Image (tube, rainbow, N blue to C red):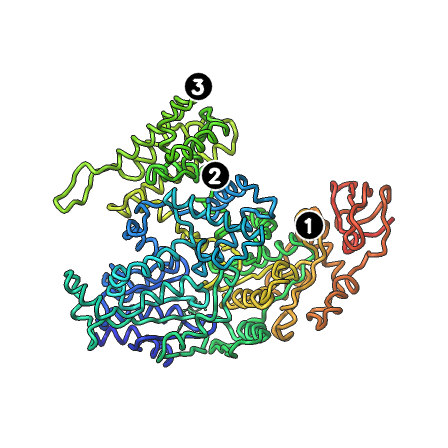
Amino acid sequence: GGEHRGRLLDGLNPQQREAVEYRGQALLIIAGAGSGKTSVLTRRVASLLETRDAWPSQILAITFTNKAAAEMRERVQAILGDGASGMWISTFHSSCVRILRREAEKIGLSSSFSIYDSADTKVTLKRIIKSLDADTYGFTPGSAGAKISKLKNELADVDSYARNANMSDPQEVMFVEIFRQYTARLRAASALDFDDLIGETVYLFRAFPDVAALYRRRFRHLLVDEYQDTNHAQYAFVHELTRPVTTALAEQMDRDGVHVRNLRDATGGIPGASLTVVGDSDQSIYAFRGADTRNITEFERDYPGAKVILLEQNYRSTQNILSAANAVIGHNFDRKDKKLWSAGGDGEKIVGFTAYSGHDEAQFVSDEIDVLHRAGMAYRDMAVFYRTNAQTRALEEILVRSATPYRVVGGTKFYERAEIKDALAYLIAVANPVDELALRRILNTPKRGIGPATETALASFADDNDFTFRQAMRNSSALGLGPKVTGAILKLAELLDAAALMLVPTVVAEDGTGSGGSNVSEVLEFLLEGSGLLAVLRGSRDPQDEARAENIEELVAQTKDFNKENPDGGLVDFLTQVSLVAAADDLDDASGTVSLMTLHTAKGLEYEAVFLTGIEEGLLPHQMSANEPGGPAEERRLFYVGITRARQRLYLSLAMTRAQFGDINVAMPSRYLQEIPTDLIDWRQSPGMANSRGGTQPRALNVRRDGYGGGFNGRSKELAGLPPAPPKTKTEWANRITGTVRDNGSLTLEAGDRIRHVDFGDGLVNQVTGEGTKRIAHVQFDTSGSKKLLIKVAPIEKI
Ligand code: ATP
Ligand code: MG
């Protein structure tokens, strides 16, 4: 005991220590970024175990990503050794799946239910919208899906929604019909979408108090990280689990042999579990997914007598970085003011950089990464953040060229690739035979001569006869489709049946548990072999197919790893694991590489050096947020999250022009930049200042050709007039870009003119497109190829 206790509390400040040792019913820890919330939660778990106030099986700790869960498990294990096994540390979604797999039959689902991701939801909605002609009412799979998701996050189902809907509005009537059919299709396929995982668990607890009581008895301590980003359904899940068990139910449990006597209090019931939540309202960035910070602000009302602990010391960042973060977030109103401070000293100034174009900005980032790396910083300690995925293109191009090892975290996920979804659909069709979506996906993949007309015929055959799609396949001889097509359908159905048989245990023990069936990789290999999926890709001359084949081989390798790591794990376990991989989970083998990710993915993480790119109006705040109530405030929190990820070095960069949707736009610096005190930022604009960057040797200037003009040479000459400090007013900002620097606004160019560009030399204007400030010259340069230049800001003159 005592020795452990010493180690557990080592280095904690008094507030953190109090949070670790508190043993009351409800505890709220609110604190700014980097103040040790997650660390305290981890130590609290360790402390509960170490003091024997809880068994591992009595703890449910909820993190935002699987990766955070794994980290917490590791840290608890590091403190306590093996004492941590049996504990549930997982995301909301993973916990709910575990519960639902056990209890599925109670709510009319098969325990091997499928989990639909957003792409699956889209395909399903697309089919529904098509069959209802709902697009004429303005519905798209995206818009209908977003609305359904929002309702589910508020725990509304189609019936409760329909009761309050305005049924004299035809659009509303149509939406209800879409929602109804969507619900029905998922039911028929024994499938749940992501939102259902939480909602159905809450429903289960509410509809079956005896089931809820079992879980309330089991989990005596709930701990939730990032509580500010919980939505109503997640709130309800927590609430259901932490409610007391009534005397009557407790007595019933004792009679049923579920021993609860030692848990019962003076009233004869079981008191509610203890609940610890940690969060920071300033980091709430998921309102668009229904997150509600009221879950934090009203915690004391929901859990009377709750203890509240504030943490204010930040252990992550330098004071300069924190001062910037404080200043920015201070511009949000209706928040409790809290000031973070650090004992770590001011540190380096924040570096600001105004680039000519997105490519130019990428070049700056790449050069700076190089400087930091040569100064001894490991690549894995650096990260580049952006608001939108589209921004990665320029970054990746430059990083590839400069041979900088990097990784895009949560970009296109492995499991979202078409060929991987194909292979997985075979497995899903075996695990859950009623999943029509999976069956239709593989019906003609690889091509076996089953066309869309046949697919539709099978679907209506199923509808008319109250068959599942699989049954329709088995009975397809009755459809008169011709021997070749019928043969292909039957062969596929037989392949799936044979694969299902492989899973049947060959040995059944006395307690009913089976073993000896084939494992996941054997089943997958059998399906790949029997369907020809892999062979077709391997035999193709298309180099893309070669890559696809390699991806499928990688999937096979993953199933083998899974077998090794989970000797008792079955097909459904594997599919569950695949479904629940979240963006930040990609980080796992990020060792030795620079991480690129969106600001949303960056939540909870920290790096020695952070590059925040594209700090421009339209990107941050994002243009979509402009008209949303609370939009700009939420975007400001996103900026705050980004700033507070940095430990030592922070870079803020923006580009004066940015290519978007094939257009070149003049970008305005983000309004949030003006909120940072000027003396905290060291503004740079030219590589000629390389000497002032940490004392590195001046490098040869890279003359780049980014297609839009610009480049270091161009910039250093053209933007030399740029003042080093950021301007104070909007007009000044605008002047900086359009006035002080360059404004070719009045330059009239037309086809046939000859121009001179600072970088590219002389050229002939072939064409001028666009209007006003967006006029673009299409120029054939004598020696530099053809380029498109935004006339207003390009470093050009007429000759
Ligand atoms: P965020 O709001 O970004 O999620 P957080 O409040 O969860 O941040 P942590 O990630 O737990 O903060 O901690 C930030 C950093 O500070 C980590 O590197 C952690 O190890 C360190 N840290 C936390 N508490 C202490 C302490 N008492 N002494 C030294 N370092 C600490
Ligand atoms: Mg944290």
Callout 1: helix, strand or loop?
loop
Task: Return the residue nearer the eye: 571 or 213.
Answer: 213
The x and y percentages for residue 318 are 51, 73
Q: Nearer the viewer, residue 64 or 43?
A: 64
Q: Amino acid at mark 1?
A: Val
Which residue corresponds to mark 1?
703
The CB of the residue at mark 3 lies under 8 Å from ligand 2 = no
Residue pointed to by mark 2: 418
* Residue 36 falls in image quadrant: bottom left
Q: Position of residue 732 (x, y in %)?
A: 75, 69
Is 697 positioned to the left or the right of 276 in the image?
right
Mark 1 or mark 2: which is in front? 2
Q: Position of residue 129 (x, y in %)?
A: 53, 43
Q: Quadrant of the N terminus?
A: bottom left
Tag 3 residue: 482
Name the N-terminal-most of marks 2 and 3: 2
Q: Residue at x 52, y 57 (%)?
A: 165
- Where residue 621 appears, x then y in whole percent? 62, 63
Q: Earlier in the sequence, mark 1 or mark 3?
A: 3
User: Disc 2 on helix, strand or loop?
Assistant: helix
